[in-house]
Amino acid sequence: MTETPSTQHEHRGVGQGSFGSTFWLLTTMEMWERLACHGMGVVIPVYIMRADGPGGLRFTAADKGTIFAIWIMVQSLLPMFTSGYADRYGYQKTIAVSISIKIAGYLLMAAQRTFFGFTKGAATLPAGTAIFTP
């Protein structure tokens, strides 16, 4: 069977042409997800336990461990239930919901000074990243 022009696909490797807009959108989304997960993982412990200056939450090491345990559970377990959303509703709608939830998580963590309030924000942020994670 010979391929007609409508069924032929161009295969481009790296350096053989530009990637489409979908590739760049998803790559950017993945970059923000990595920044949320890994970047916050470096900054959050200092913010949580800072007791020697203004601005820290002054939580204990056990509180920090609990917050991180919840964060990791949400980040790791939620994709098992949400990974089909992008296929069902489309990647654009899924990205919009994911970004909205991430923004809510950042705002909650910035605005809350209590353990439960901050933990709620710290669980919301990884929920936003986990929705788009396959």
Image (cartoon, rainbow, N blue to C red):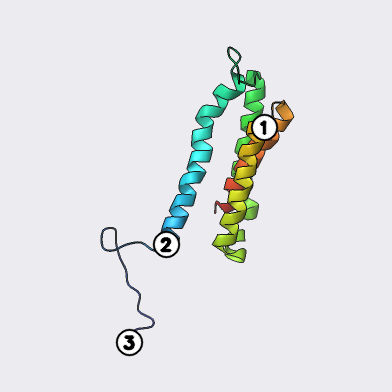
The residue mark sitting in front, 2 or 3, is 2
- Alpha-carbon span between mark 1 and mark 3: 62 Å
Residue designated by label 2: 21
Is residue 83 shown to the viewer in this render?
no
**Rendered residue at 59%/55% (across/down):** 96
**Labelled disc at residue 2:** 3
Farthest residue, direction left: 16
- Alpha-carbon span between mark 2 and mark 3: 30 Å
**Labelled disc at residue 111:** 1
Mark 1, other Cα within 10 Å: few <14 / some 14–19 / many ≥20: few
Q: Which type of secondary structure does the marked residue at label 3 adopt?
A: loop
Q: Amino acid at mark 3?
A: Thr
Residue 27 coordinates in the image, percent (x, y): 44, 52
Q: Amino acid at mark 2?
A: Ser
Mark earlier in primary sequence (2, 3): 3
Q: As displayed, is residue 25 above or below residue 112?
A: below
Q: Are marks 2 and 3 in contact (CB under 8 Å)?
A: no
Query: On the image, which quarter does residue 61 sit in?
Result: top right
Q: Are marks 2 and 1 in contact (CB under 8 Å)?
A: no
Query: On the image, which quarter does residue 104 sit in?
Result: top right
Residue 40 coordinates in the image, percent (x, y): 53, 33
Q: Which type of secondary structure does the marked residue at label 2 adopt?
A: helix
Quadrant showing the C terminus? bottom right
The residue mark sitting in front, 2 or 1, is 1
Mark earlier in primary sequence (2, 1): 2
Mark 2, other Cα within 10 Å: few <14 / some 14–19 / many ≥20: few
Q: Is residue 42 left or right of residue 94?
A: left
